[in-house]
Image (cartoon, rainbow, N blue to C red):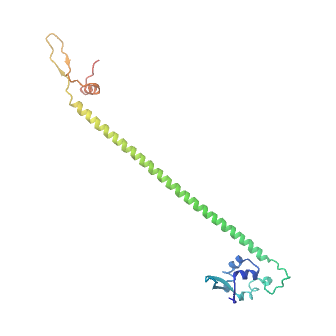
Amino acid sequence: MNDTISIKEAAEKFGISEQAVYKRLNTTFKPYVEQRLNNRGKPQKRLKISILDDAKDLGFNNRLTTVEQPLNEPQKPPQESSENASEAVSVAFLEKMLSDKDAEIKRLVKQLEDTERRTERRIEKLLEDKKKELDAKDEQIHELHVLLDRQINANLQLPAYQEQPSDAGQSESITQPQDQPKGFLAWWHNFWNGTTPTK
């Protein structure tokens, strides 16, 4: 791969961060990008070695560092490197904010779904309880109707009061049959026949 250099090598040559190199792969460095396989057989983006010759045309001027640079000459950090680092920090910060917002949205959506499910279950339980109450009321009403019909039929089958002829010289008296109903049935019998029991 002597005709290409890695992203890391390009960053060292140009005195910028690797992230800054990656940002330029789709812009100024795009004509120099090549896809090669690394030692593990996976595709890897590299840059043509000719990019070093075109450094000035790419706007780096004297910022390009070479192996032949004297060791005793200190390398000054370029201003562009600090600017790129600042941009990288800003991008990372914004990405972190976006990630946090996405997590918050997912949490709220899940909370809303859980609340809706709990509300639906409560409504279903309430409707079920009310239906049971209505069924119980209907059963109670039916039983009362049956009991009332039985009482009415039983009262209709009771013998009515009969008037007995009076003896000569004595006032007529009303006698009751021996099997006179008592309690509630007696009251209902009297009520049905329009009479009021005397004490």
Task: Determine the residue located farthest toward the front in the rendered image.
Answer: 40
In the figure, is residue 58 to the left or right of 136? right
Find the residue positioned furthest to the top: 169
Q: Is residue 44 above or below residue 179?
A: below
Q: Quadrant of residue 36?
A: bottom right
Left or right: where 153 falls relative to 168: right
Position of residue 8 measured from the top left corner of the image (x, y, whole percent): 71, 80
Q: Is residue 100 above or below residue 25?
A: above
The answer to which quarter of the image holds residue 95 is bottom right
The image shows a total of numbered marks equal to 0
Residue at the spot x=79%, y=76% of the render?
A: 79
x and y, in percent, of residue 118 in the image:
50, 53
Towards the viewer: 107 or 169: 107
Q: Is residue 3 above or below residue 142?
A: below
Residue positioned 42% across, 49% down in the render:
128
Could you tell me which residue is drawn at 75 percent across and 81 percent down? 12
Residue 9 coordinates in the image, percent (x, y): 72, 82
Identify the image quadrant of the C terminus. Answer: top left
Of the 4 image quadrants, the one containing the N terminus is bottom right
**Residue found at the very far left of the displayed protein:** 168
Q: Residue at x 26, y 36 (%)?
A: 149
Which percent across, then down, holds residue 192? 25, 28
Describe residue 123's horizontal placement relative to residue 161 as left or right: right
